[in-house]
């Protein structure tokens, strides 16, 4: 996800492998400013790209230049989560 994400959860509902977090049953669900895609679990099906109403999701190789650092932000979200 990139900065335009408005956390409306359209992508989360459509993802076939549930790799978009946090899920609705997670304590952080109501407080996060954006959702995150786990790059290890994502199968690159593209369903979330089409579902997003604000164009906040891009395949990594198609990330606009100004959003390129979000690949790292998404990856690090899960690296930090796996350490706690
Ligand atoms: S591209 Fe990845 S994150 Fe998006 S719906 Fe498919 S598996 Fe889920
Ligand atoms: S569909 Fe787009 S705006 Fe909605 S939560 Fe997913 S990335 Fe964010």
Image: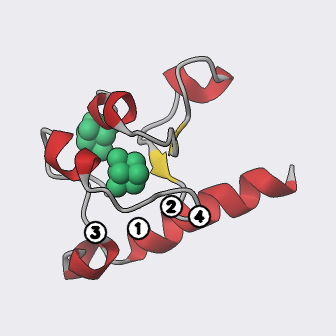
Looking at the picture, does residue 5 appear above or below residue 22? below
Image position of 44 (left or right of 74): left
Q: Are marks 1 and 2 in contact (CB under 8 Å)?
A: yes
Residue occupying the point 36% across, 62% down: 44
Q: Which residue is mark 3?
A: 59
Q: Secondary structure at mark 4?
A: loop
> Label 1: how many residues lie within 10 Å, few (<14), some (14-19) or many (20+)?
some
Check disc 1 and report its element: helix, strand or loop: helix
Asked whether the viewer can see residue 5, the reply is: no
Report the residue marked by disc 1. Answer: 70
Which residue is tagged 2?
74
To which quarter of the image does residue 66 belong?
bottom left
Query: For the residue labelled by badge 3, is the local secondary structure a helix, a strand or a loop?
Result: loop
What whole-number distance in Å separates the C-alpha atoms at marks 1 and 3?
11 Å
Q: CA distance from mark 4 to mark 1?
A: 15 Å
Precedes in sequence: disc 1 or disc 3: 3
Within 10 Å of disc 2 (Cα), the crowding (few <14, some 14-19, many 20+) is: many
Residue at image location 25% in from the left, 56% down from the top: 46
Report the residue at 52% width, 64% height from top. Answer: 39
Q: CA distance from mark 3 to mark 2?
A: 13 Å
Quadrant of residue 62 within the rendered picture: bottom left
Spatial separation of the CA atoms under disc 4 and disc 2: 11 Å
Looking at the picture, does residue 52 appear above or below residue 2?
above
Q: What x and y, as percent, mark residue 57?
A: 26, 56
- Within 10 Å of disc 3 (Cα), the crowding (few <14, some 14-19, many 20+) is some
Mark 4, mark 1: which one is toward the viewer?
Answer: 4
Q: Is ligand 1 less than 8 Å from the beta carbon at label 3?
A: yes
Counting residues from the start of the chain, the first of labels 4 and 2 encountered is: 4
The dot on residue 40 is 4
Labels 3, 2: front one: 3
């Amino acid at each position: 996800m990139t900065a335009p994400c408005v956390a409306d959860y359209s992508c989360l509902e459509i993802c076939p492998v549930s790799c978009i977090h946090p899920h609705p049953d997670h304590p952080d669900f109501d407080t996060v400013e954006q959702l995150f895609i786990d790059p290890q679990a994502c199968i690159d099906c593209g369903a979330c790209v089409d579902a997003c109403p604000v164009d906040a999701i891009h395949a990594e190789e198609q990330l606009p230049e100004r959003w390129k650092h979000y690949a790292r932000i998404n990856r690090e979200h899960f690296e930090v989560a796996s350490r706690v």
